[in-house]
Every structure is written in C-alpha cells, then in structure tokens.
C-alpha cells in the first residue's frame, strides 16, 4: 500500500466511516473505493470521484477535533493552500487523499500526453485555436470578456449541468471578475440531467450573480448521458469558444476558439432558437413592473406557507396602519393616490396578521450592524416598492422606530413569529432582502443597482439551495441570540436610543 492511498483510509478510520458509507453517499462503486484504498487504482485529484469524496468527508468533519486533525495532516504534508476557508480545506483534502497530489491540481500540463508534446505540436494546436486545461481556457476566455463593450450580454449554452469547468474555482473566479469589472450580463441556457446535485452546485457557485440579476439562467431537459459534455460561450459578432470535457473527468478540458464570422453568426442564431424553448429559473423585475413586484410580496406574506426572510434593512410590514399612513401622507398630497395606497397596505397588513393568527410559521433575520447605522444616520434607505412607489426611499427616524416597535409587538403577540438579530449578515446579503417561501418560491429584492430589482422563482432546485443557505444563517443565531426575550431586549434598547435622538431634535418628518 502506498502512502498516498493510506490517507483516505486514515481519514475514514478517524471519522469512523466505512467504505460502504462512502460509497452510498457519493455514488461511487464500493469496489472502486476499495481499489483506491489498496493502491490498485489511482484516485486523481481532477476526477469527479475526488470531488465527491472530499465534499462528503468535509461534511462529516463536524467537530473541532476532526478539523484540527485534518489541519495537522495538511501541515505535516506541507500543503501550501490556505486552510482558513472551506475552499482551502477542500483543495487540501483533495490534494491529500489523491494519488497524484505531487502535481498542482490546476496545472494545465498535468497529463502525460501534454507534457510530451513538442514545441511544434503546441504551436500547431494554438494556430488551430486549441487550448488545454482549465487555467488556459479561463485565461483565453477572459480576453474575450475584456474585448466586450460594457452593458452587453454574453450567451452561454451547457449541454449538461454535469459540466465540471463551470464550477471550477479558477474558471468561476474569472467569470465573477469579468461580469463585475466589465458591467456585462450573461444569459446561460443549461440542459439539465434531472440529477439536482449538479444543478445545485452551479446555483451555489453563481448565487451572487443570480441575486444581482447579472446572470440569467434558463433550463430545459435533455439526455442524461452524453458522449462528451460541452459549453458554448458566444461573443456575438466576434468569437465562439467551444469547451469540451469527457464525462469521466480524468482528462483536462479542451477549448477551441473560433473567429469565423459565418460560424459565429450561425451559432448565435442556433442559440436564439434554443433559448426560445428554455424556461427561466428566475423572473426578474425592475420597478417599471412595480405592480408585479407588489403582487409577489403579497403572495410571499399573505398566502399560507412558512416564510423565511433575511433582510439587510428593516421591514415596513410590521408598521401599524397609522404609522404607515403617516409616511404615505408625507409624500402623497394627491388624495386619490393616498387613498389607494392606504387601502393597499391595509390589504397586506390584515392578510399578514390573519396568516400569523392561523399559525403560519414566520422567521426573519436582521443585522445589528444595520440597526446601529440607522440610529447613527437617523434614517434608513429602502426600496420604494415598500411604500408602493419606484426608486429608493429614505425612511425617517420616526418611521424606523415604528417598525422596531412593530417587531416587539409581533414577538409578544405571535409565538409562531421568530426574529434573530446577527452582528452582521454575510456579504452576499449586502443591500438586499431574501424571502424563501418553504417549498414554494424564492424572491430576492436587490438594491445594489441604480434601481431596485426583484428576482422571483418557483424552481425547485433554486428553492432548495436558497433554503439551505437560509438555514445556515439561521443557525448562526442559536443560543442567546435566538432567545425571544433577548431579541426583544435588543430591540427595546435600540428604540430607547431612537427616542433619545427624537427628543433631542430629530423631528418625525426628518430624513
């Protein structure tokens, strides 16, 4: 037995797991796992098997003792990857348990055939537009992104959600950076296999772009087994990148870059035809469609079903009718407009209270950092749709105080309403609000652009992933922060600070 293969065995033993446990969790044949451990079969770091095994082992590293043990093994093996992050831990674990860990995982020169290629062969392949390996493909694609004018869109088509390169950190980091730096959007059509694990990994990787609306995902069902997996990246009127992988996963992907004008044009036309038959994973509204956004909010809050909310702000839904109407009166002098907005909020308010009275579970997470900022600034910026308008709205300190008082009232009144206050929210939640209607829908209100947008979906894979993400954040507030009395005491303390500021000269109408 080699030292390399014994590492997997040592980890299973330390975590008190059997070969069969590993096989059942990962879908890998038990006999293949036995051959990995015996050293009769190489476990390659770039294989899907290594990826699945590492994910399972990290999930089972559920105590500090197990984590520290893994860190000790990594340090003893002089692995250079940062082990303070989940990604760093995963990369280290794949390196440590694999049989080919002596070569960096992202080295495009790893396969023997590529190492033995002559300079003439390499140059000939470059002339054909061929690129080998994830890093080389990502670098070549980044040039295409840099050549795009801002505010344009790039089209991507994936023949399968099992394509590995789309979730590879080297490739996805390039996509994240390109979309952010160039202020461009991406339309992605994915042929889904029906195995939600693969689609869920794509969702996890690009959740930030989904929330901001810079990536729009569309799906349709196709073949569950392909001879090869491919991705087409179409820079209209310029270039098409064709990236091909083997389904097995041991070989590096190959990228071919085509500049022929007729080919690029016909590929664009083919993409458009496929796009028409796909289904959007997210419906995206800006406040030109404020009526649609309002009706989505009504469905989230006022029809039966458990609701989970995480909000980098505070929620006007908890204002009393009188407090809400005061805010409306401030900015709506037209009696007709004022009247219909008052009636609309009453419809929301009464239906929401009715749902809570009938026992609808409702959980919300807000940020203590945001609450302190509201006290300091004497106002709160939120989407205008919460007050039945467009753009953004600055709610005055009195309005913010009324919302917190509403939180306290609802906590005292409804045992099925729970609130957790975290010191701060993850970066992914900066200036937005998530609603997850359990097993029904997910709605994201994002306020990072020039105008608020809402992303809404009933796609089961999206709901599942966003629900898992919500539960992770909710668990951060377990213990004292999850105690109802403690949460009320925090709110009352913030309210007292607001009252002192109002008493010292901040008028109810001051923004």
Image (cartoon, rainbow, N blue to C red):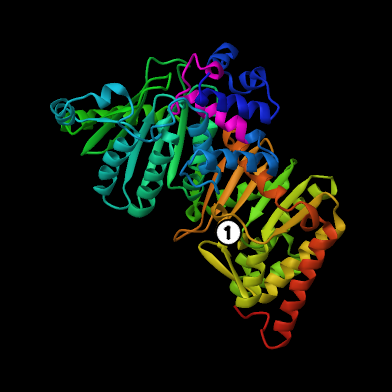
Q: Is residue 458 above or below residue 326?
A: above
Asked if residue 460 is positioned above or below residue 404 in the image, the reply reads above
State the residue lying farthest toward the bottom.
504
Pick whichever, 49 or 428, lies toward us. 49
Residue most extreme to the top = 31
Q: Is residue 301 visible?
A: no
Image x and y of residue 491, in percent: 77, 67
Query: What residue do we see at 64% from left, 18% from top?
Result: 19
The residue nearer to you, when weighing 18 against 448, is 18
* x and y percentages locating residue 488 in the rendered image: 81, 64
Classified by dominant secondary structure, the portion drawn in magenta counts as helix
Q: Picture quarter containing residue 112? A: top left
In this rendering, would 319 be left or right of 201?
A: right
Verify whether residue 478 appears in magenta: no
408, above or below 464, in the image:
below
Give the side of residue 70 with respect to residue 262, left or right. right
Residue picked out by circle 1: 385
The part of the chain drawn in magenta is 36-58
Q: Position of residue 476 (x, y in %)?
A: 70, 51
Q: Which quadrant would the C terminus be assigned to in this image? A: bottom right
Please determine whether, in this image, residue 280 is positioned above or below residue 285: above
Q: Please tell me how many numbered marks the rendered image carries.
A: 1
Q: Residue at x 69, y 44 (%)?
A: 64
Helix, strand or loop for disc 1: helix
Q: Residue at x 66, y 49 (%)?
A: 473
């Amino acid at each position: 037995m080699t030292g390399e293969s014994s590492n997997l065995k040592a980890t299973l033993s330390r975590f008190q797991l059997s070969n069969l446990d590993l096989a059942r969790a990962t879908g890998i044949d038990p006999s293949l796992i036995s051959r990995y451990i015996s050293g009769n079969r190489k476990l390659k770091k770039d294989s899907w098997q290594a990826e699945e095994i590492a994910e399972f082992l990290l999930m089972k590293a559920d105590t500090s003792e197990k984590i520290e043990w893994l860190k000790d093994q990594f340090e003893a093996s002089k692995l250079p990857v940062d082990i303070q992050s989940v990604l760093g831990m995963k990369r280290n674990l794949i390196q440590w348990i694999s049989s080919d860990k002596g070569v960096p995982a992202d080295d495009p020169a790893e396969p023997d055939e590529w190492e033995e290629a002559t300079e003439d062969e390499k140059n000939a392949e470059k002339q054909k537009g061929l690129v080998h390996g994830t890093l080389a493909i990502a670098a070549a694609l980044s040039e295409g992104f840099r050549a795009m004018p801002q505010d344009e869109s790039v089209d991507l088509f994936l023949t399968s959600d099992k394509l590995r390169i789309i979730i590879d950190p080297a490739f996805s980091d390039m996509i994240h950076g390109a979309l952010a730096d160039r202020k461009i959007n991406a339309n992605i059509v994915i042929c889904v296999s029906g195995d939600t694990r693969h689609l869920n990994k794509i969702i996890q990787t690009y959740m930030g772009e989904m929330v901001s609306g810079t990536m729009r995902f569309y799906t349709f069902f196709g073949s569950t087994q392909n001879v090869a997996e491919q991705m087409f990246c179409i820079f209209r009127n310029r270039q098409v990148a064709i990236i091909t992988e083997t389904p097995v996963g041991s070989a590096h992907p190959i990228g071919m870059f085509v500049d022929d004008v007729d080919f690029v044009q016909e590929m664009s036309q083919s993409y458009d035809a496929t796009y028409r038959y796909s289904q959007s994973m997210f419906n995206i509204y800006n406040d030109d469609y404020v009526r649609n956004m309002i009706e989505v909010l009504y469905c989230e809050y006022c029809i039966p079903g458990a609701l989970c909310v995480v909000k980098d702000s505070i929620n006007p839904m908890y204002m009393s009718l009188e407090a809400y109407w005061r805010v409306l009166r401030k900015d709506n002098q037209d009696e007709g407009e004022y009247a219909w907005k008052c009636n609309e909020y009453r419809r929301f308010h009464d239906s929401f209270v009715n749902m809570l009275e009938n026992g609808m579970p409702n959980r919300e997470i807000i940020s203590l950092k945001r609450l302190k900022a509201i006290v300091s600034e004497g106002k709160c910026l939120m989407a205008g749709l919460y007050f039945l308008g467009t753009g953004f709205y600055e709610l005055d300190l009195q309005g913010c105080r009324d919302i917190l008082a509403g939180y306290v009232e609802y906590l005292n009144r409804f045992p099925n309403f729970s609130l957790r206050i975290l010191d701060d929210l993850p970066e992914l939640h900066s200036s937005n609000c998530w609603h997850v209607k359990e097993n029904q829908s997910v709605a994201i209100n994002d306020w990072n652009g020039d105008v608020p947008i809402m992303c809404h979906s009933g796609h089961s894979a999206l709901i599942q992933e966003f629900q898992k993400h919500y539960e992770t954040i909710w668990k951060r507030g377990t213990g004292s922060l999850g105690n109802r009395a403690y949460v009320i005491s925090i709110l009352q303390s913030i309210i007292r600070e607001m009252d002192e500021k109002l008493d010292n000269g901040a008028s109810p109408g001051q923004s």
